[in-house]
Image: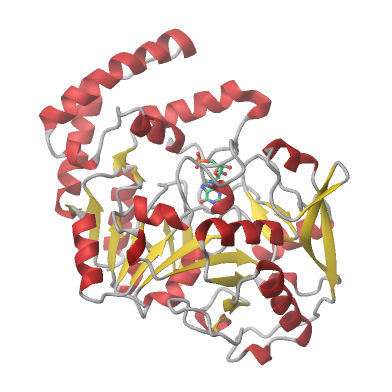
Amino acid sequence: MSTLVVVGAQWGDEGKGKVTDVLAASVDVVVRYQGGPNAGHTLVVKGEKYKLHQVPAGILHGKECVIGNGVVLDPKTFLEELEGLRKRGVPVDRIHLSHAAHVIFPYHQRLDELEEERRGSQRLGTTGRGIGPAYSDKVARMGIRVADLLRPETLKAKLSRNLEQLNHLLEHVYGVEGYRLEDLLELYTGYGEALRPFVTDTAQFLNKAIAQGARVLFEGAQGTMLDLDHGTYPYVTSSYPTAGGACLGSGVGPTRIDAAMGVAKAYTSRVGDGPFPTELKDEIGDYIREKGGEYGTTTGRPRRIGWLDTVVLRHSKLVSGLTSLALNHLDTLTGLHPVKIAVGYRIRGEVWESLPLHMEDLFEAEPIYEELEGWAEMPSALSSFEDLPPQAQRYVKRVEELSGLPVSMVSVGPGREATLVRFDPFAAAPATR
Ligand code: IMP
């Protein structure tokens, strides 16, 4: 078994970067397959704190890192990230950037803001990084790809065509100033030159590596419930975080994927607007937010907090074909009693164990909770499952039963010693679980 997709099993921020960090030592290649600078990982390696938005966390372990065709790249922030890594002595020559990834322009960010303003109370709460507008251009077949930045004449032709339409929209619909072709052309031709050494056909690179037996980890950004098709549409991002997105966004076919691991926290969080059935708007929510440091890496926004929702986990298992689950932040629930897990919803008197057909019904879904005994203390390092307090062990086992997923990894803190790998998530789950 040599390929694993790591997928957020909730609304993002489940700690995928940390899981990748733990697994990175045993892999050869780490791949980002969707999203852009809307994602963010904070990693602590050898006491140094790193904030990464577009570069896969594997770079800190000297692994080959691929930014696939499914990503939307902001060259400015990407190059700044590279500079930051270089300054701290992290070699960046193992980064491979797909020629077919789409490029974010300043007008995408501007449109992101303007569209959010226009939505008013129906806003999505986007990260404001231009993600939706950049993917819209891609789907409308007017996107500009990384390869285009390497050819000024192609870039000029595409950009001038786009600006004609875009400036009309900005000036006549939104009543704001448009963009000048010369300014963007100069800036992005410069970016193209800086990116050139990294640009390659990453589908070729990856398929060759897999054929040669490399262990490859596909690291999803965001999470299942933010997936454009399988999430709480329209309160979603504009890409495909679910496991199928790894194939589309990297050019590696589904027959080459061995396993998919969902990553969840022992509770739920969400940034941005949209339905969240188990949301806690009380002091328990505040307790978890403070204890878990639940503030956005990209925007600094306080995250919305709720109890663990196994309807969401079952949905994630279903749409990504998950083979195991990593359960993070178990320590954050320490001191709470009882702890609750949602097993279903009641919507206008009807019981649902899966998501309703009408997304808007989720706004009025009342979670059906099961209560479990809490635990008062948690060790800071784990060497076996039995190190967990018995109540926490029962909690994990109950999550396994309700989600239908064996828990391959459990973590009780940010450091690597706080993560227990119960079985290799690249492999199929042991039959005994
Ligand atoms: P966008 O991706 O900026 O368009 O934002 C769409 C939705 O996805 C908003 O609710 C964002 O808060 C959410 N979102 C985007 N990226 C992340 C992430 O990395 N973690 C959690 N939520 C995210």
The residue located at (45%, 44%) in the rendering is: 239
Res. 231 in view: yes
Residue 129 higher or lower than 422, as above or below: above
Quarter of the picture containing the N terminus is bottom left
Q: Residue furthest top?
A: 172
Q: What residue is rendered at 20% in x and 75% in y?
A: 212
Residue 241 horizontal side relative to residue 412, left or right: left
Q: In the rendered image of this protein, does residue 306 appear above or below residue 156?
A: below
141 vs 77, nearest the viewer:
141
Give how far across and how far down residue 215 sits, in percent: 32, 75
Residue extending furthest toward the right: 349
Q: Is residue 230 left or right of residue 268?
A: left
The vertical placement of 286 against 172, above or below, is below
Q: Quadrant of residue 46?
A: bottom left
Q: Give the number of callouts.
A: 0
- Residue 180 placement, left or right of 108: left
Q: Nearer the viewer, residue 315 or 130?
A: 315
Q: Nearer the viewer, residue 217 or 94?
A: 217
Q: How is the image coloured?
A: secondary structure
Tell me which corner region of the image, top left, top right, bottom left or bottom right, holds residue 375.
bottom right
Which residue does the image show at 48% across and 14% down from the upper left? Answer: 174
Q: Position of residue 316 (x, y in %)?
A: 58, 58
Residue 238 picture location, percent across and down? 47, 40
Q: Is residue 37 left or right of residue 68?
A: right
Image quadrant for the C terminus? bottom right
| Residue 94 in view in this figure | no
Looking at the picture, does residue 366 appear above or below residue 166? below
Taking the spot 61% from the left edge, 54% from the top edge, the residue there is: 295
Question: Residue 401 placed where, x, y %?
Answer: 70, 74
